[in-house]
Amino acid sequence: MPRHQPGNSLRAARELYLEATNDPSARPLVVASWQRSIEYKVESGSLDAPYLDNPNLDSPLARAALPILDTLHEQLADDPVSTMITDRNGVVLSRKVSHDGLTTHLNRVRLAPGHVFAERYVGTNGIGTALASGRPVVIAGRQHYVEELREFHCAAVPILHPTRSTLLGAFNLTTIRQGSDGMLMAFARSVAAQIEAEIAAITSRRERALFQDYMEACSSARPGPVLALNRDLVMMNEQLSAAVTGPDHYALLDHAREIADHPRLEGTRSIALPSGRVAELRVSRCRREDSDAGAVFRVRLIGRAQPSSVVSAPPDRSNLGLVGSSPHWLRAVADSETAFVAGTWLHLLGEAGVGKRTLVEAMHRAHGAGRRLEIREAPLSDSPAVTERWLHDIEELLVVPSNVLLLRDVHLLGDHLRHRLTNLLVRRDGGATGQLVMTSQPSMVSADDGLDQLCGALVEVPALRHRFGDAEHLARFFLRKYRPSGESGFSPDALTMLQRCPWPENVRQLESVIRGLARRPSGRMIHAEELPPECRASSNKVLTTIEALERDAILRGLMDRNSNVQRTAQDLGISRATMYRKMRRYGIVPSSLT
C-alpha cells in the first residue's frame, strides 16, 4: 500500500481508500475516518491496540450495560456474534461471545477487554469510528484501515448520557459472518437504546432518591437553608437562595461539589465565604441508591457580610507577613497561630502547594524564639532498618521540649508505619515533649484516623482557587520578589486571567509562573498574551508531564491560529472531534485565547 504523509487532503485519503478496497461507493464517513487514520500515522500493515490494566467497570455506563450484555449473551448462544461495551476512549470494558471460533479470531487481534480500539491506535474500525464521528457506523471487511481487522464486520453505536448528551462510550457488535449490514446495525441500535434507557432509569432513581432526602431536610421542624446536589443536579430551598447570593453563591456551590465528590466525607465542615461570612455545612450522604446519589447539606451562616469596600480591597498581608486576605485563608492562619502559640499539637490539611510549610515557618519566625524547627518527611524505603531509624529519630526529636517537629505529608506513610508512629506518639503525649505539627492532604485522611486524633487542633488550609482575590496579591508579591529592581505590573486582562485560572498546583504553581515572567525585561507591563498556556485552561486536574505538554501544544496552536479549532487540529494531526474532547478535558475555552 502506498504511504501518504499526514496533512494530505480528503481527496488523497479517498484515493488511498479506493486503492485498498476497490469500493466505488466510498462513504464520506468512512473516507473521513481513513483520513484521520493517515494523520495519526497508523500503520495499516500492523495492529497496535494498547492495553489498559483494570478498566473502570464501576462507571454509570458499565453498571447499566453489563446486565444487558449478560442477557444478550444467553439469547445469542452459539451464534458467531460478539457484543462489546467500551468507554468513551475506546477501551473495551466487556466482551461477550459464546462461539469458540469467533473467540479465537477476536483474541488474535486483541479485540478484548482492556485493549484500546480508538482510531488513534488502530485506524478505522467500528468502535473507534463511532466514537470519533459520534454517529452509528458499520465498518465491514476492507473498510477497516488495518489489514488484520478486515475479516470482521462491525456495527457500533455511540452511547450518550440521557441528560447531558455527553459521550459515555459505545456498543459494538462484531462478526466474521457476511450478511446484511442493515440487520446488524438495527440490532446494534436497539441494544444501544436499551443501554441508554437503563442509564436514564438509574439516573432517575438516583435523582429521585436525592430529591426525597432533600424534601425530608426541607420539611423538618427547623429546616433552615438546604442544598442538595450530585454531578447532574443542584437543588436549594428559597431560604438558601435568598441568603447566599453573588460570589458567596458560587463559592458555596464550588465547595459543596468538592465535598459531594468524596463519598467518605460526612459530618460538619465550615467554609469561609468571600463576603467574610462562614458557612457551616452539615453533610448527609444519600444512601438510598449508591454513593453517587449525591449529598444533602444543611447550611448555617455565621457572621455578617463585610462592606463591599472592605471585601474588594483588603490588606494583602496577615499578621505573620503572609500574603493573602481572603476570609478562608485568614481564618486558617489565625487558627493555626493560636494553636502554635499555645503549644498545641497541630495538624494542617491542604492540597499540595497551598503553603502549609510556609505557614509553619512563618509561625516559627514570629513565635519560636529559642525553639528549634526540625522538618522530617516519610522515609523513602519501607525496609525495617530504615523505618526503625526513622521512628527513633522522631522519638529523639520529641524528647526535647524546645523542639518544634514538622512532620510533612503523613498521608504517604504506609498503614504499618502509621500505626507504629501513632503508638509512639501516644506514649509521648502528656509528658514533657516537643511540639508536633503534621501536614497532609485532606482527601487522604479518613475520619477515624487515630494519628489525626492525637492533635489538639485540626486546620484546613484552603486551595488557592478558594482564596478569592488572593491570586492578584500573590502575583504582585512574587513579581516584586523575582524582579526587585524593575517595575512590577500586570495589565487588567492579565490579572483577570490570573484570577480565573484554577491553579491545580496552588501557590507553588503561581510562583513558578511569575518567576518565569520575571526573567523577561523589566520596566513594562505584563499583558495576557505573555502568560503561559497553563493560565488559559480552566481544569482543576493536576496533569502528568505528558498531559501538560499536550495541553500546551493545543493552547499554543489555538493562539497562533486565532482560536481556529479545525486548523489547529489539522496541524497537530488529530481529528476535530478528538480536539474538542481534549479541550474539554483540559478546560480550554477558545474565547479565552483571543
Image (cartoon, grey):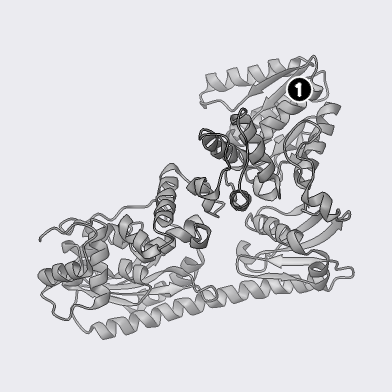
Is any part of residue 277 visible from this angle? no
**Residue under the image location 83 percent in, 70 percent down:** 239
Viewer-side residue, 182 vs 395: 182
- Find residue 396 and report its horizontal and vertical position in percent: 69, 15
Question: Does 322 sit left or right of 444 as displayed?
Answer: right
* Amino acid tagged 1: Arg
Viewer-side residue, 138 vs 417: 138
Which of the 4 image quarters holds residue 431? Answer: top right
Q: Is residue 318 above or below residue 372?
A: below
Q: What is the quadrant of the N terminus in the image?
A: bottom left
- Find residue 158 and report its horizontal and vertical position in percent: 39, 73
**Residue under the image location 13 percent in, 58 percent down:** 3
Question: Does 57 sit left or right of 73 as displayed?
Answer: right
Is any part of residue 545 visible from this angle? yes
Q: Residue under label 1, please give it.
A: 365
Q: Residue furthest front?
A: 523
| Crowding at mark 1 (Cα within 10 Å: few <14, some 14-19, many 20+) | few
- Find residue 232 and report its horizontal and vertical position in percent: 60, 69
Viewer-side residue, 538 vs 375: 538
Q: Is residue 337 above or below residue 555?
A: above
Q: How many marks?
A: 1
- Find residue 98 and report its horizontal and vertical position in percent: 29, 70
Label 1 SS:
helix
Question: Does 277 sit left or right of 477 as displayed?
Answer: right
